[in-house]
Amino acid sequence: MDSIDLEKLLTKVEKPARYIGQEWNMIKKSDYNYRFALCFPDVYEIGMSHMGSRILYHTINMLDGVYCERCYTPWTDMEKALRDADLPLYTMETKSPLKDFDIVGFSLLYEMCYTNILTMLDLSGIPFLAKDRSESDPILLAGGPCTVNPEPVADIFDVICIGDGEELDNEVILMARQCKKEGLNKKETLRRLASIEGVYIPSLYNVHTENGKYLETVPAQEGVPARVSRRILKDIDSAPYIGNQVVPNMSIIHDRVAVEVMRGCSRGCRFCQAGYIYRPVRERNEETLLKQAHDLVACTGYDEVSLLSLSTGDYSHLKTLLPKIIDSMLEKRVSVSLPSLRIDSDLREELEKMQSIRKGGLTFAPEAGTQRLRDVINKNVTEEDLLRAVRDAFEAGWAGVKLYFMIGLPTETDEDIQGIADLARKVSQCYYSVPKEKRGQGFRLTVSASTFVPKPWTAFQWCGQCTLDEIRRKQQVLRTAMKGVRGAELHCHPSMLSVLEAVFSRGDRRLTSVLIDAYRNGCRFDSWAEHFKPEEWENAFEKNGLTMDEYAYRQRALEETLPWSVIDAVVTDSYLKHEWKKALEGKTTKDCREGCNGCFGEKCENYCSISKR
């Protein structure tokens, strides 16, 4: 793209730093023969905060002759500027149009970003549907957690990668490059890519329906796997990491160094998709983490290190790792932060040490307001755990606490909702019971109540979501109950957005036409309240003869074939069914660190170190 055109373009947008590139540590290559566009379907400041994209940017660029460049969804002002100037969407590194790349890959982290994918394709002149693209168009690839149910977007993508991407994506790229070298056409290339473990090629499968209802997805030809197994990276300690982290040109959502201490979670919360699809637990060594933290601080200049995982408090060596990192960073005044903490994590001394440099807020996730409901969801924490944890924090000088809950969980009653307010009130009382000389100043209690969304590959995947009216009623019950809680602020997730998320979480291929029509009706940035257009989504469903109710609210039968059954997430169907039945009985399942629960069935010994103890 001509630099003069770009300069004129950026005078018309609110945040030009989103589009200029040339960041510190941006990778530059001149010797390459294959190009991969790493696309994130949201704005720059969100995409630049995503650890998975940072890892893939580094690992793909480690391949000789392959250049991986980044691209993000332009905000609405930039979209308009590009259209007015008749210019294509371009990458950050070389300002090249996406259509010029061999592979265009998207990270699918959230269903409500799907219309942003269409924005990026539309601005690039790339047809939405795989069947409409020619040999000259790029191969479209998708990866990320949403691909464990790829069906709502399956007709859009040529290749869908299921599971950990560090090794998988590189194998796909190298094989596709070899196919190009051999002169194979796209159909032949896709047929060869289907042989890679973890690769789903939607065009090689037929979808059977009856009276407009989904029945099953089956291979269209011999040699295609009946189910595609999730790819699992067994050794994350020796796997390539971020390299020299790109430093953004503007403030981003997570503007800090982040190190992934472990992948997976052993707790088994029944609502948590990530807890199931990132199994088994794999940890990095202390020495690896210390080196990564120091290397990243040195190459970026950041003054904060965040220790990330689904449950950092469960990292085996956290009590020795935290003091080492804090002490080694003390001279540089680099602070250490933790994400959402397990309520039963015993970190009193560590909290005191962390706040010696910088006090922010702490986040805890009780998820439910009563012990009965916490047992249903297998949270395995108690009210006493929460109050002990917040008291430890308050006595260590912390004053800001966030509590995450869900409403609309299976078997929930109004008493459970009232329990959320009761817990918040007790946390507030706990703060004011701590002597003034110990506690921090300016108490802040944020209570966040999201709406439960049943997700594929969880014990609750068969469960229907609460109706829109019921969600709103429950939210009002909570608002009323929260009145008078000292220092507390309540945030409820938009109810209609949660319903639409449930639709696309559990949907099938019929939703692709709904998605395209919604986009053409003006839908994009659906997760942003100021841009969400529920009426246009309703119009798109009506036009296609579908309803949100049948996807979001309907209870699925245990014997029903689910749209995502073509994927093997390794956790077995029988285990998930067993967990669903235990949930209805209010019975809990032990943490798998206390002994293997057999969630992988016959594959436990292949993947899970716990099963070998």
Image (spheres, grey):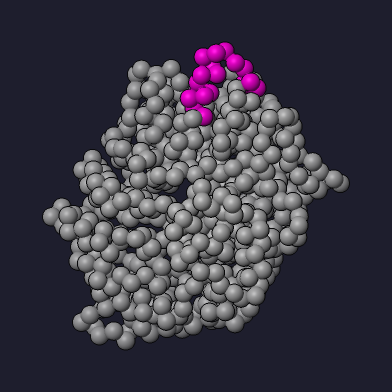
Q: Is residue 360 visible?
A: yes
Q: From what the image shows, is residue 557 above or below residue 212?
A: below
User: 164 or 465, which lies in front?
Assistant: 164
Task: Answer left or right for 386 relative to 376.
Answer: left
Q: From what the image shows, is residue 401 above or below residue 259?
A: below
Magenta highlight on residue 187: yes
User: 455 or 45, which lies in front?
Assistant: 455
Main secondary structure found in the magenta portion: helix
Residue drawn at (35%, 67%), measured in percent from left and top?
362
Q: Position of residue 16 (x, y in %)?
A: 38, 37
Residue farthest to the right, as pictured: 211
Q: Position of residue 498 (x, y in %)?
A: 61, 59
**Quadrant (top left/top right/bottom left/bottom right) for the C terminus:** bottom left
Residue drawn at (37%, 70%), measured in percent from left and top?
345
Residue drawn at (13%, 55%), measured in percent from left and top?
331
Task: Answer left or right for 60 relative to 156.
Answer: left
Q: Is residue 477 visible?
A: no
Q: Position of residue 72 (x, y in %)?
A: 46, 37
Q: How many marks?
A: 0
Residue farthest to the left, as pictured: 331
Magenta segment boundaries in residue numbering = 172-188
Q: From what the image shows, is residue 69 above or below residue 228?
A: above
Q: Position of residue 238 (x, y in %)?
A: 34, 41
Residue drawn at (18%, 54%), measured in percent from left and top?
329
Residue farthest to the front, as pictured: 613
Task: Answer left or right for 607 relative to 410.
Answer: left
User: 63 or 78, which lies in front?
Assistant: 63
Magenta highlight on residue 566: no
**Quadrant (top left/top right/bottom left/bottom right) for the N terminus:** top left
